[in-house]
Each structure stands twice: as C-alpha cells, then as structure tokens.
Image: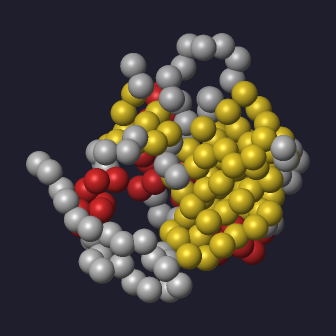
C-alpha cells in the first residue's frame, strides 16, 4: 500500500494545504521507537505514562527530550512537580509496560512491577530497566496536541551487562529487537 499526500511547510502561521490525518498516523506506525516509562510525583501523588517519543537532546549538559499529549494526566502533574523519572524498558518488562499503559492514571499504574525511588523523595523508576534517569524539567513548549519537554538529567543508572534486549513499539504493538 502506498500512501501519498502533499504537506507544505508552514510559514508564518499558514496552514498546510491538506492535513494528512489518518495517512500521517499510518506512516508513523512504520517508525519503531524504544519504549520508556515516564513517571512524576508531587508529595504522595504519583503517575506516569509509557512513551516512545524520547531521545537524547544534549550531552552537555545531559538533557533528554520527550513529548507528552497535553490531555495526558501525566502532563498536568509533571508541570506542577517539575520533576520526572525515566525508565528505558527492556523486552523482559513487556507485560509490565503494557499493564502500566492500560491501568487508570495515578497510583493504579504502579500495581505491576517492582518500583523504587531514584533518591529518597525522588522520582520513581522500575527495577530491571535498561537505564534509569532522574530529571528536572528545564523547559516545556506547548505545541498543537503535545507538550515538548526538555529534561535536565540529574542522576543516571545503567544496567550492567549486555544480556537484555530493548523493548520497541512498532506497528501499534510491542516488539523485541532480536
């Protein structure tokens, strides 16, 4: 199946000639992405979401870039708290990631898996992650349906060894690399 549409660059606030809609979504399903769980807390309140839109932004200073839907319950608490935890998910944690994504927002999301704080009073990360970060929100940009988040990395933990595959999201399902 070939999808073709024309999208003109936006210049000075002008709209594209034709909005790609479903064709655009279908095309993006071909982009495989690593799966991460982003958490945030404020006092006793905590929540999070599964994302595949996370990448490194800068090595100096160490900064991550991620996007969250603005109507996502995590976005509001993230903006209020100014902090987040990021767990890069291994294929072994596929069911945990799936359960986390399907659970109602808030505390219910933490019912599956083994969770811990990065530091006392810090952010929550999942045991068995390939890597985990504690970050503070450095800047947010609200654009269209999403919130672009630049997150300054405060702490980094990596899993020792090469025995784990990353979990990928491709064509609307979780996949293994190997």
- The residue closer to the viewer here, 55 or 96, is 55
Q: Residue furthest left?
A: 1
Image quadrant in which you'd find residue 161: top right
Q: Residue sitting at 85 percent across and 47 percent down?
A: 61
Q: Residue sitting at 50 percent across and 42 percent down?
A: 35
Coordinates of residue 111 in the picture (x, y in percent): 55, 49
Coordinates of residue 97 in the picture (x, y in percent): 48, 43
56 left or right of 14 in image: right
The type of colouring in the image is: secondary structure
Q: Is residue 143 above or below residue 177?
A: below
Q: Residue sitting at 27 percent across and 77 percent down?
A: 18
Coordinates of residue 148 in the picture (x, y in percent): 62, 66
Query: Which quadrant: the C terminus?
Result: top left
Q: Is residue 117 visible?
A: no
- The residue closer to the viewer here, 152 or 16, is 16
118 left or right of 141 in image: right
Q: Is residue 96 above or below residue 12?
A: above
How many numbered dots are placed on residues in this image?
0
Q: Is residue 31 visible?
A: yes
Coordinates of residue 23 in the picture (x, y in percent): 23, 63
Q: Residue sitting at 80 percent across and 53 percent down?
A: 152
């Amino acid at each position: 199946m070939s999808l073709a549409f024309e999208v003109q660059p936006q210049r000075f606030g002008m709209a594209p000639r034709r909005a790609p809609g479903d064709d655009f979504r279908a095309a993006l399903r071909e982009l495989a992405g690593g799966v991460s769980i982003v958490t945030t807390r404020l006092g006793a309140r905590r929540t999070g979401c599964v994302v595949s839109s996370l990448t490194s932004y800068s090595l100096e200073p160490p900064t991550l870039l991620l996007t969250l839907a603005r109507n996502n319950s995590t976005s509001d608490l993230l903006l209020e708290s100014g902090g987040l935890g990021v767990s890069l998910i291994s294929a072994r944690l596929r069911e945990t990631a799936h359960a986390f994504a399907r659970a109602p927002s808030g505390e219910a999301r933490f019912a599956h898996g083994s969770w811990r704080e990065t530091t006392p009073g810090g952010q929550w990360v999942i045991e068995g992650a390939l890597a985990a970060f504690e970050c503070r929100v450095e800047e947010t940009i609200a654009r269209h349906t999403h919130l672009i988040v630049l997150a300054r990395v405060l702490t980094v933990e990596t899993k020792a060894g090469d025995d784990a595959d990353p979990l990928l999201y491709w064509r609307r399902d979780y996949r293994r690399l190997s």
